[in-house]
Each structure stands twice: as C-alpha cells, then as structure tokens.
Image: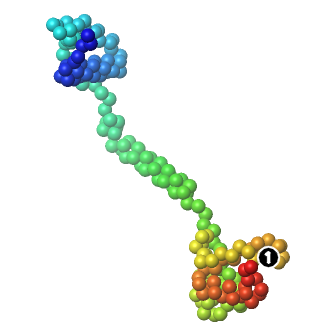
C-alpha cells in the first residue's frame, strides 16, 4: 500500500530538501566538504537533522563591487559605461534609420509649362513615398527607359495631367 503524506509533512520535507541544497551549494562555493547525511531516525521514519549553522556567519558572501570600490574609480567606471551606452544607442539608431530619397516634383522641373500660381505652390522636393501622384509610364526619348514622374500637390497633378493630354500621352 502506497504511503500518503499530509500537506504539512510534504512542506516540511520540501523545506528540509531546500535547506540541504542551499547548504551544499554554500559548502561547495566555500571549498568545504559536503555534509554527511544523517540516517533516518524517529518514530515515523522522518529524517532528523541538526539545526543548520547560520550560513552568513560561516561563509561571507562577496560584496557588491560598486559598494566597495573607491569613489573615484566608481565614477570613472560609470563614465565608461555611459560612453558605451551612448555608442550602442548611436549604432542602433543608425541601423534603424534608412536613407531618405528626395525626388523632384514635375512642376519644379517644367516651370515653363505650369502657371505661376502652381509653381508658387509647388514644394519642389518630395521625400520618397510622400508624393500625391506617381506616373511610371512615360519613357525618356533619349534612352527609351521609363522615367517616373512624381507630383507633390493637386495643383501640380492637374497641370501635369493637362500637359500630358496635350502632348498625346494620355492613358490608354
């Protein structure tokens, strides 16, 4: 018949095992010999162990180096860490930012074909992806390659489409 354990007994055994594990870890770190297991004793078969010695008194734990180093050295170390942190921030920022490509608006390159009021409203430089309209269809007569046209505003778009229709380049 299997043996059943009460919750109190399970907790006591768990605490005992935890203490033994901690004691063994501290002894190993201090270079001490492992504790000798005490054979079971008592009426109910429980293992009785002597009360553990206070661990902090037996093995001093290493102090935090920031607590013990001279103040001048600590300030130099903090300054070095700050430089490293700033360098890491700069590298990550540079990696995350991509180069912005600037396009010219069609009206800025064809001022003679647009009304002066449209030329005055034209923003001229358009960051990549911020155009109002992009036309990839017109071909450069010199090379035969497509030369995309970017337009920055509705006034420029209206002028471009009127000029395109007048030159016979309307969409099919």
The image shows residue 7 at horizontal and vertical percentages of 20, 23
Q: In the rendered image, which quarter contains the N terminus?
A: top left
* Residue positioned most to the bottom: 116
Q: How many marks?
A: 1
Answer yes or no: is residue 172 visible. Answer: yes
Mark 1 crowdedness (10 Å alpha carbons): few <14, some 14-19, many ≥20: few
Above or below, 13 relative to 152: above
Q: Residue at x 19, y 20 (%)?
A: 6
* Residue positioned most to the left: 43
Q: Is residue 56 left or right of residue 163?
A: left
Answer yes or no: is residue 58 visible. Answer: no
Q: Which residue is mark 1?
A: 140
Task: Report helix, strand or loop for mark 1.
Answer: loop
Q: Residue at x 60, y 70 (%)?
A: 129
Q: In the rendered image, which quarter contains the C terminus?
A: bottom right
Q: Nearer the viewer, residue 69 or 84?
A: 84
Q: Residue at x 45, y 50 (%)?
A: 85
Above or below, 47 relative to 146: above
The image shows residue 145 at horizontal and vertical percentages of 79, 71
The image shows residue 64 at horizontal and vertical percentages of 32, 35
């Amino acid at each position: 018949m299997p043996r059943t354990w009460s919750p109190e007994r399970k907790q006591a055994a768990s605490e005992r095992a935890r203490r033994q594990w901690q004691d063994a870890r501290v002894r190993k770190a201090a270079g001490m010999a492992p504790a000798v297991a005490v054979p079971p004793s008592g009426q109910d078969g429980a293992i009785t162990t002597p009360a553990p010695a206070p661990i902090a008194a037996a093995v001093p734990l290493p102090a935090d180096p920031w607590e013990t180093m001279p103040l001048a050295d600590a300030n130099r170390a903090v300054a070095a860490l700050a430089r490293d942190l700033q360098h890491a921030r700069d590298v990550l920022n540079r990696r995350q930012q991509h180069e912005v490509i600037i396009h010219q608006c069609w009206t800025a390159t064809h001022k003679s074909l647009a009304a002066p009021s449209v030329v005055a409203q034209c923003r001229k430089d358009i960051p990549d992806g911020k155009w109002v309209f992009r036309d990839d269809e017109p071909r450069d007569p010199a090379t035969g390659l497509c030369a995309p046209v970017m337009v920055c505003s509705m006034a420029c778009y209206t002028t471009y489409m009127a000029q395109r229709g007048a030159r016979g380049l309307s969409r099919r």
